[in-house]
Image (spheres, helix red, strand yellow):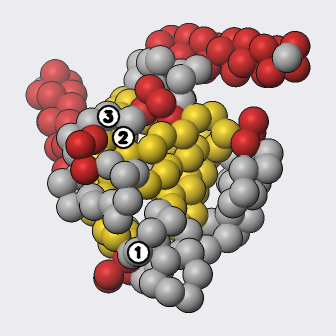
């Protein structure tokens, strides 16, 4: 009887996990959810779930100034951000657009690049990057993925308005692996900061 009850509990727990993974899909679509914040100091706040977290937006200059998009996201405890794929709805009006990533709830880098050393990383993406995982460029100090915590994203295009889409993949991380992931990331960030300081 106890074994049967244990198996039922395990089945329910697995169903919940599968449901959570399946429910995390299009997290924000600017056409439906509204425009992302235009300020890095007050980004739109999101919470990622297990699985796919799709972000769809529009950036560029419609003639009245550049519409930059800023959003922050939280990776839940016990998980890691393991991919950032460029989706096939992405387009650029010049040769490339820009995406940057900073740890914490704000992007403190100015649009002219002041404070760029605070970014974990950045990437210039174009139509030829559709289907490409940008995480190694956005977070080079975290080769195993970004551990749980809050991060902020800055997306911009200097030319005319263009759509973009990113799929942020979140996977469960066993607790010992999560500790090693965090430690390796912290060591990597420390090495990068020492290198910047020694220049």
Circle 3 packing at 10 Å, graded few (<14), some (14-19), many (20+), is: some
Q: Quadrant of residue 173?
A: top left
Q: Residue at x 54, y 40 (%)?
A: 122
Check residue 170 in the rendering and tell me which mark sits there, or answer none: none
Q: Residue at x 67, y 70 (%)?
A: 39
Check residue 133 in the rendering and tell me which mark sits there, or answer none: 3
Circle 2 packing at 10 Å, graded few (<14), some (14-19), many (20+), is: many
Q: Quadrant of residue 93?
A: bottom left
Can the viewer see residue 43 in this picture?
A: yes
Check residue 84 in the rendering and tell me which mark sits there, or answer none: 2
Q: Quadrant of residue 159?
A: bottom left
Instruction: Looking at the picture, tell me which residue is in the foreground, 2 or 10.
Output: 10
In contact (CB < 8 Å): disc 2 and disc 3? yes
Q: Position of residue 97 (x, y in %)?
A: 43, 54
N-terminal label among 2 and 1 = 2
User: Residue under circle 1?
Assistant: 160
Q: CA distance from mark 2 to mark 1?
A: 24 Å
26 relative to 157 in the view: left or right: left
Q: Residue at x 45, y 44 (%)?
A: 124
């Amino acid at each position: 009887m106890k074994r049967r009850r244990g198996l039922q509990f395990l089945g329910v727990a697995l169903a919940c996990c599968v449901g959570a993974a399946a429910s995390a899909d299009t997290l924000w679509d600017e056409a439906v959810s509204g425009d992302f914040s235009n300020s890095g100091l007050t980004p739109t706040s999101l919470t990622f779930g297990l699985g796919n977290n799709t972000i769809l937006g529009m950036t560029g200059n419609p003639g009245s100034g550049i519409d930059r998009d800023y959003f922050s996201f939280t990776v839940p405890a016990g998980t890691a951000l393991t991919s950032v794929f460029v989706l096939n709805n992405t387009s650029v009006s010049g040769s490339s657009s820009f995406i940057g990533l900073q740890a914490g709830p704000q992007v403190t880098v100015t649009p002219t690049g002041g404070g760029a050393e605070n970014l974990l990383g950045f990437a210039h993406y174009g139509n030829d990057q559709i289907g490409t995982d940008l995480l190694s460029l956005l977070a080079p100090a975290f080769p195993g993925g970004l551990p749980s915590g809050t991060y902020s994203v800055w997306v911009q295009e200097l030319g005319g308005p263009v759509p973009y889409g990113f799929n942020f993949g979140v996977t469960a991380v066993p607790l010992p692996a999560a500790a090693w992931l965090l430690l390796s990331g912290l060591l990597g960030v420390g090495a990068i900061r020492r290198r910047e300081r020694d220049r």
